[in-house]
Structure formats: structure tokens, C-alpha cells
Amino acid sequence: MTYLDRAHALKDKLIAIRRDLHEHPELAFQEVRTAQRVAETLHDLGIEYETGVAKTGVVAYLGEGEPRLALRADMDALPILEANDVAYKSQNAGVMHACGHDAHTAGLLGAAMILNEDFAAGKLKGTVKLIFQPAEENADAEGKSGGQRMVEEGALNDVDAVIGMHIISTLPSNEVYVRAGPFMAAVDTFEGDVIGRGGHGAYPHEALDPIWLAAQVITAIHGIVSRRINPTKQGVISVTIIHAGTATNIIPESVHLSGTIRSFEPAVREQLHADLEKAFAVARAFGGDYQLQIIPGYPTTVNDPKIAEFVRAMATDLVGAKHVNEADIHMGAEDFSFMARAKPGCFFNVGAKKDNMHRPHHNPNFDIDEAAIPTGAALMAEAARRYLIENTK
Ligand SMILES: [Zn+2]
Ligand SMILES: [Zn+2]
């Protein structure tokens, strides 16, 4: 039996784990119950593990010695009220697994089940490190995400390479997508205030309307990518939060603007930051002022060409060439990027579109075709098996 057959034989078990996690989602760095479920499953398999890694993460080892590969899954959910009317609907109101990290956790446990059997039977030599990381979606008070903390705590120090997978609810189910080189964007966020002078809504000339100033600032921001960045490069700035005002007859003192900045190349990233500063400075042309803070987020996710080609070849043999696709680059960001900077890595996608409906990530209607869970588990397990075999000296 191939790992694909063996993973699909575990389908009901993996779906049960996914649904249990889906019903009990936990936000970044609060994955206590989730980590407990992971630990219990590893314990039942007789796999050694450590909890409390990167705060609420779990790491486990299969086998020993070289070669050494890490497989990574993320475990956190999002602050979204689930709209799906399903038996496994979130019971934690306002928190939802709307990115599929429940499926990643279940899938990596599935890979552990398969690999564990083969290690026990003496069929595999080397080490597979299982990384169940917390907090992919958000950072803690120190501005660090789970993947960043894992790397800083040395979780990648004792491996040679790392592989991660994300299911994608908008791509055809069970299709595999791989790309070598830069794959997902770098992300930074900004928090800004456009400062005017408050007053009566009927006497704008006696005040300095910050809403009018903010309108100029937003127009300037929206021109940055189209007019300032080389059209052959990728970048985006989206203003996603705007707050001002208390009453219809009061001109407020200031307007708060915040949003997200995405890029691939360091030079573009720097230019977006510099031009964002200039866009806010438009407020000064009319006598206003501004404050702007740019908060660095995740770096670009860059897949190591050799590991990416290894994953592509492995997937082609496992699921067939017609189901393995060249992935498009994403403006989305991933904190797997920290791991792929620490060691040669590859992050790949598995499609999981459900009922041919549009259920995008980070949306109250997000859901997946659960058949993608065993497929993901098989791909992760097969990647480990092949890596150990091909890299044994
Ligand atoms: Zn997400
Ligand atoms: Zn995600």
C-alpha cells in the first residue's frame, strides 16, 4: 500500500480529529486544549514529545540520527464568528478555524501515524521532527509569531530541512501546488494618525478637517503601487482600518488609519515604507500633521529550489503528474518563512475546495473538502520517507 492508500484508510480518524479541533478553536498562543489533543494522540502512538515549545507548541521526534527532516503544522484559529451550519460548528463563539489549521494539525498527526508504523517496523532510518506550532495568524505582545518563536528557541537547529503544507479552500480539492523560489509575500502593518484641528461641522474654515486630510492621504497611498513601484515588481498597500468622529456636527481632531503592506523584494519593501511616509506627509501640506508606525511582520517565504523540486517529484510519484501544478505566487504571508530562512525549506499547497462553492480563507463561511486531509497527511509522510531514504549516506 502506498502512503496515499494508508492515509485514506485513516480518513475517518483524521476527520474526527479535525472536527474536534474545529469545534474547539483557540486563538494564537492560547492553543492549550489543541496542544493537549496533539500530546494525547502522540502519547497513544508511543511517540516522544515536548509541550510548551514557543509557549503553546508541541514538538515530537520519530527515529534518531541523520538525516533529519522537520514537518510543520500550525494550530491556531481566528477571531471570526462561524456562519456555517454544520455538526462540527465552532463551540467557542467568535473564534473559528477559518484558515484550515485544524486540518493541518490533523494531517500532521496522520503523517505521524503512518511514519510511526514504518519506524517501528525498522523500514526508516533517520529523524523526523514534528513541529506543531502555535500562533501563525498573530504575534504576541513582543511582536513575535509562533513560527518566529520556534526558530528563535532553536526548533530548527537539529534538522537539515523543513517542509510545511497549507490547504487552500479556493483551489480544486486534492490538487497539489508547488513553486520553487519566492512563493509568499513579506508582510508589514502600519498604524497612522492624520492630525488636524477639531471644530464645528458648520465652520470647517475655523478647524482643519482631518477627514479631508485623510482623504488626500488615502488617495496618495493608493497611487504608490501604480505610480511609484516598478510595474514588473509585486507590492500592495491596503488601508483596512479607518476611525474618526463622534457626532455629525463635530469635526474630529484626528483620523486613525491602519493597514497592510505586502512585497517580495527587500528594495520594494523599503520603497513602500518610504513612500507610505511621504503619503502621510501630504497632511502637512495643508498645515496638518501625522504620526506613522510601520510594524515589521513576516519575511518573504522563499522555497529552496532543491527542496521544492524534491517535493514536486515526490508529489508527482504519489498523486500523479496531472494533479501536481505550478503554484502561483501569493500576496498572502506565512510565518513558515522564518523556518525556511533558518533551514532549506518548502511550503506547498493542497487544494480543498468544498461543494464547488466560494469559501475563502478568513471568512465566516470558510470550510474545506475533508478528503484533502488524508491527501495532505500522505504528502507530508511521503516527503519524510523519501527524504530519509534519499539523504542516507
Ligand atoms: Zn490564515
Ligand atoms: Zn493559514
Image: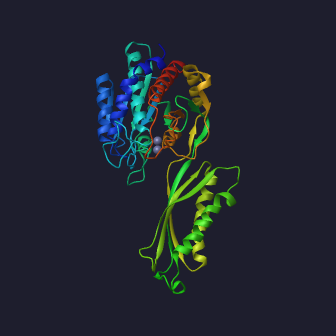
> What's the residue at 52%, 28% (across, down)?
174
Can residue 37 be seen here? The reply is: yes
| Residue 138 spot, x, y in % from top left | 42, 49
Up-down relation of residue 266 to residue 147 (above or below): below
> Tag count in the figure?
0
Comparing 225 with 275, the one in front is: 225
Comparing 198 with 367, the one in front is: 367
Comparing 389 with 247, the one in front is: 247
| Residue 226 spot, x, y in % from top left | 67, 58
> What's the residue at 35%, 49% (across, down)?
94
Can residue 309 be seen here? The reply is: no
> What's the residue at 55%, 22% (across, down)?
319
> What's the residue at 32%, 37% (across, down)?
35
Up-down relation of residue 286 to residue 327 (above or below): below
| Residue 10 spot, x, y in % from top left | 39, 21
Up-down relation of residue 110 to residue 229 (above or below): above
| Residue 187 spot, x, y in % from top left | 53, 51
The answer to whether residue 303 is left or right of residue 354 is: right
Q: How is the image coloured?
A: rainbow
